[in-house]
Amino acid sequence: MKNVEMSVEGNILTIKVDLTKDFGPSTSGKTIIIASSEGNQSIPGKENVKIGLNVYKKK
């Protein structure tokens, strides 16, 4: 994952993303990628629960 931290306490999922990061343009070139789970990923400790996350800004 790029710039994504996840943690689970009980039944609460917390996601941390540093909004100052920049991983360059998306494939289409229309946006700048800030963070990505790079597809669907399992939640730590809850492998049957998945997350797909993309954080981006317009160019």
Image (cartoon, rainbow, N blue to C red):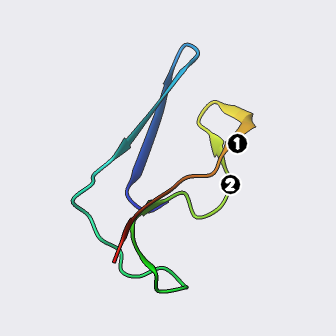
Secondary structure of the residue carrying numbered label 1: strand
Q: What residue occupies the far right of the structure in this picture? A: 48
In this figure, which residue is indicated by the disc labeled 1? 50
Determine which quarter of the picture holds residue 39: bottom right
At x 58% / y 15%, what residue is drawn?
A: 11
Q: Nearer the viewer, residue 15 or 10?
A: 15
Q: Is residue 19 above or below residue 44?
A: below
Q: Position of residue 12 (x, y in %)?
A: 52, 19
1 and 2 marks in contact (CB < 8 Å): yes
- Amino acid on which disc 1 is placed: Lys
**Mark 2 nearby-residue class (10 Å; few <14, some 14–19, many ≥20):** few
At x 70% / y 42%, what residue is drawn?
A: 50
Q: Nearer the viewer, residue 10 or 53?
A: 53
If the image is split into quadrants, where does the C terminus sit? bottom left
Cα distance in 3D space between marks 1 and 2: 6 Å
Q: Position of residue 35 (x, y in %)?
A: 42, 60
**Mark 1 nearby-residue class (10 Å; few <14, some 14–19, many ≥20):** few
Q: Nearer the viewer, residue 56 or 53?
A: 56
- Amino acid on which disc 2 is placed: Asn
In this figure, which residue is indicated by the disc labeled 2? 40
Q: Is residue 36 above or below residue 42?
A: below
At x 63% / y 30%, what residue is drawn?
A: 45
